[in-house]
Image (tube, rainbow, N blue to C red):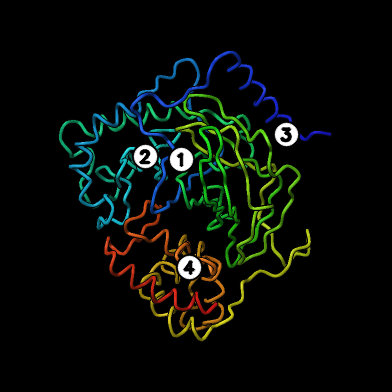
Amino acid sequence: MQSKFLSTWSIAAAAVLASTSGASLLGACGGEPAAFTSSSSGGDGGSSSGPGGTGSGGDDFVDNGAELFAELEPDLMTACGTCHQSGGIADTPFLAGPVVYQSVLSWPGIVVRNAAESRFLTYSVTGGGHSGTNLDSAPNDLKGRVQAWLEAEAKAIGSSPTPESPQVEPVTPIEGFNVLYLTPLGEDFAGIAVSFEAKQLTPSTLELRNIQVHTTKTRGLHALHPLFVVYPKGEEADPDPMDNFAGLDAYFPENSSTELGTGIAVLTNWQDQAKLGIAFEVLEPWSSTAGEGGGSAGGNACNDVTAFTNSARNALQTSCGNCHAGGNGQATNALDMSDLQTDAAAACGQVKNRVNTTTPANSQIFVVTNPNGNASHPFKFGGNATNWNNFVNQVTTWINAE
């Protein structure tokens, strides 16, 4: 018998097909940058999540987001570019080139379903806690123009057909490394993430590889039937027609980085400038010590704790310890380094979950902190590439030993 989750998505998919029958799907307008653009530095597609919201789409949609942004871009760069371009001191390069519009779209928390909840309008304004130039103090009504642009972009995000299902809100993926955090779904999911590497094979085919679930030191996860969902610009959501993970019922122990199913999904319903989300039939916290669903004790034991202690520990403490060693709860949940000085083996196991022993340069801890990268991470060595390179070299010595 088909589950309610499957039935709802099937009805939604049929509705999309019916609504587009006999007409071509919306594509990129001439002269606009493609919504999925190759990035030499990789990137993090973002991490907003929660139930489906109030995106518009439909007959009243006017695709003018790129046009509105092009008009305000010079003033936005004047007000914010010094800090927020690649290598900027703000560690948040959402204005990175070569295509600034693409960088802004892919940065989490900026383009969202409800424009009023954008970081631009909640943080980068007077009283929002921003220490740089606030949009409402910039000339030429920059805040008003940014708001109008955000509202236009919000209308392009279709509503989820199953808003009651646990799901990650749609984000704009970047070619290379992406992370979707489950933290906004509730405290039980704080720090848990789904990561993947994205590559556009054809205009209508997006390949996701190395799809992994990263749990935390104290939280495991039970996931039933993950379903990737494409959100074409200005149209209704379009679930993965191949349903790559139908029937998957997986348990992920604490302190682990584990492939989601086969670790690969090929989405044949991709469109330029679309967003990507993921929904679950069931998503709930789980403990490997509870004895349910099989599973094994979490952890990723290190092969060379001595190399970790001698080469990586001090670099990690200096560059990451302020947040990941207990100073910031969200950061510590995502990657717990609180044992760096007291239990090197335990800390090593935690960090090993976020490195790539086959290709160290592709390790998450390097990709997300790269000052010249577009990954969403609040620390990028203050824009200092030399300091980042020194960090990479020290930690890589340990990774190679693993």
Report the quarter where the N terminus lies.
top right
Amino acid type of the residue tagged 3 in the rendering: Leu
Looking at the rendered image, the disc whose residue lies closer to the viewer, 4 or 3, is 4
Residue 102, numbered label: 2
The residue that disc 4 covers is 360
Kind of residue at badge 2: Gln
Identify the image quadrant of residue 142.
Answer: top left
The numbered mark at residue 81 is none
**240 to 56, vertically: above or below:** below
Nearest to the observer: residue 142 or residue 66:
66
Up/down of 72 relative to 93, above or below: above
Query: Helix, strand, or loop for circle 2?
Result: helix
Per the model, the C-alpha gap separating discs 4 and 3 is: 39 Å
Check disc 4 and report its element: helix, strand or loop: helix
Q: How far apart are marks 2 and 3 (CA)?
A: 33 Å
Q: Quadrant of the C terminus?
A: bottom right
Identify residue type, mark 1. Thr
- Whichever of callouts 2 and 1 sits on the residue coming sooner in the sequence is 2
* Disc 2 versus disc 4: nearer the observer: 4
- Eye-nearest disc, 1 or 3: 1
Which residue is under mark 1?
A: 172
User: Relative to residue 383, is residue 228 drawn left or right?
Assistant: right
Q: Which residue ends up furthest to the left in the rendered image?
A: 139
Within 10 Å of disc 2 (Cα), the crowding (few <14, some 14-19, many 20+) is many
Q: Where is residue 23 drawn, in percent x and y?
A: 55, 15
Q: Which residue is drawn at 60% across and 34% down?
A: 268
| Lower sequence index among marks 2 and 4 | 2
